[in-house]
């Protein structure tokens, strides 16, 4: 349950029918209509909106360009700019793909493949929970839907500030995930791991050094969360890298779920070494489809004394 309001996630309240919420109801109906559009129209709209966002969201564009500059120094200026633009297009495509997953899931039929499912099955057969080390992908909940075709994933989520929007998103996600765990509910997260669940968890953002250490990410020192070490230690779960991405012709896209072997000796006695290893796993994943990641987040915002500023 969110600390920002007293409503319980997923529950309908009569107050949601008050005029103050009518705009959201209208927007939801509009989004549902977008979900039934042919993909040819959806991807054209996404390209148009992505280009628009790239042009006018100057702060996000600047952050994206800077992230790509430091993470892919081998790219030319032109390549950085083009890939930065594609990040925004992929973000908009991800919105449509998520709408399809929520309201028109049959669109994904015969478009999904998976590699490495046995790594989850083996761990669960041994009675262990699985912490799926993933990323903040532009595919959003469409990625969860892809996974749900092969196993039952849980997800860690942050409740929305608006209670109606939170309720609607929670209910849509309930059709995809076995359980939705509030990011503040550490006890619930540990309980689900102890029960043998597979939980999608993304340790790829900068939350400062109160929750982590400085470790290289694409060769750049970055504040790296280490909370998953404690989760794994307490729950006796295993960490399994998970990545999903779109590939092939954009006019007829295919989707791939890649599951890698469980990370050995995680957590180890060395917090920094663990952070370095996890960052390297994420880095290798992102190199597969670089623009399908939320590069508009300030991944390198924490710069302790002695570290060069990135932004």
Image: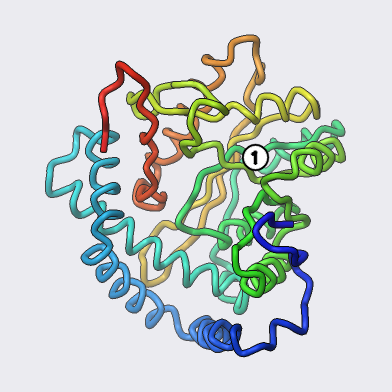
Q: In the structure shown, which secondary structural element does the residue marked by tag 1 occupy? A: strand
Q: Nearer the viewer, residue 181 or 195?
A: 181
Exactly how many numbered labels are in the figure? 1
Q: Which residue is mark 1?
A: 132
Horizontal and vertical percent for residue 262? 65, 29
Horizontal and vertical percent for residue 298? 37, 42
Q: Based on the displayed image, in which of its 4 quarters is residue 184 positioned?
A: top right
Using the rendered image of the protein, determine whether residue 12 is visible from the camera's viewpoint. Answer: yes
Q: Nearer the viewer, residue 253 or 25?
A: 25
89 to 71, vertically: above or below: below
Using the rendered image of the protein, determine whether residue 36 is visible from the camera's viewpoint. Answer: no
**Would residue 281 be found to the left or right of residue 53 on screen?**
right
16 to 306, vertically: above or below: below
> Which quadrant does the N terminus fall into?
bottom right
Q: Nearer the viewer, residue 55 or 278?
A: 55
Horizontal and vertical percent for residue 303? 35, 27
**Residue at the farthest top position:** 269
Horizontal and vertical percent for residue 133? 59, 37
Q: Based on the displayed image, in which of its 4 quarters is residue 176 positioned?
A: bottom right
> Which quadrant does the C terminus fall into?
top left
- Residue shown at the point (41%, 78%) measured from the top left: 42
- Residue shown at the point (24%, 47%) measured from the top left: 65
């Amino acid at each position: 349950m969110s600390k920002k309001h007293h409503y319980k996630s997923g529950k309908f309240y009569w107050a949601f029918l008050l005029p103050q919420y009518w705009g959201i109801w209208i927007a939801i109906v509009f989004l549902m209509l977008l979900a039934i559009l042919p993909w040819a129209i959806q991807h054209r709209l996404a390209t148009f909106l992505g280009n628009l966002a790239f042009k006018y969201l100057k702060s996000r564009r600047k952050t994206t360009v800077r992230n790509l500059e430091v993470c892919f120094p081998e790219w030319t200026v032109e390549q950085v700019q083009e890939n930065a633009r594609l990040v925004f297009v992929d973000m908009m495509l991800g919105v449509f793909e998520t709408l399809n997953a929520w309201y028109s899931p049959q669109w994904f039929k015969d478009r999904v493949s998976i590699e490495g499912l046995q790594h989850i099955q083996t761990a669960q057969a041994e009675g262990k929970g699985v912490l799926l080390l993933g990323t903040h992908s532009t595919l959003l909940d469409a990625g969860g839907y892809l996974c749900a075709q092969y196993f039952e994933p849980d997800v860690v989520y942050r409740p929305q500030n608006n209670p109606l929007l939170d309720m609607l998103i929670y209910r849509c996600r309930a059709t995809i995930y076995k359980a939705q765990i509030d990011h503040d509910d550490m006890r619930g997260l540990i309980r689900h791991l102890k029960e043998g669940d597979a939980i999608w968890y993304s340790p790829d953002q900068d939350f400062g050094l109160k929750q982590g250490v400085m470790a290289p990410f694409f060769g750049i020192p970055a504040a790296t969360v280490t909370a998953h070490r404690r989760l794994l230690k307490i729950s006796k779960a295993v960490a399994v890298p998970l990545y999903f991405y779109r590939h092939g012709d954009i006019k007829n896209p295919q989707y791939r779920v890649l599951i890698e072997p469980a990370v050995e000796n995680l957590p180890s006695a060395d917090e920094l070494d663990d952070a370095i290893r996890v960052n390297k796993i994420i880095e290798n994943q992102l190199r597969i489809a670089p623009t399908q990641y939320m590069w508009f987040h300030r991944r390198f915002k924490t710069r302790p004394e002695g570290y060069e500023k990135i932004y």
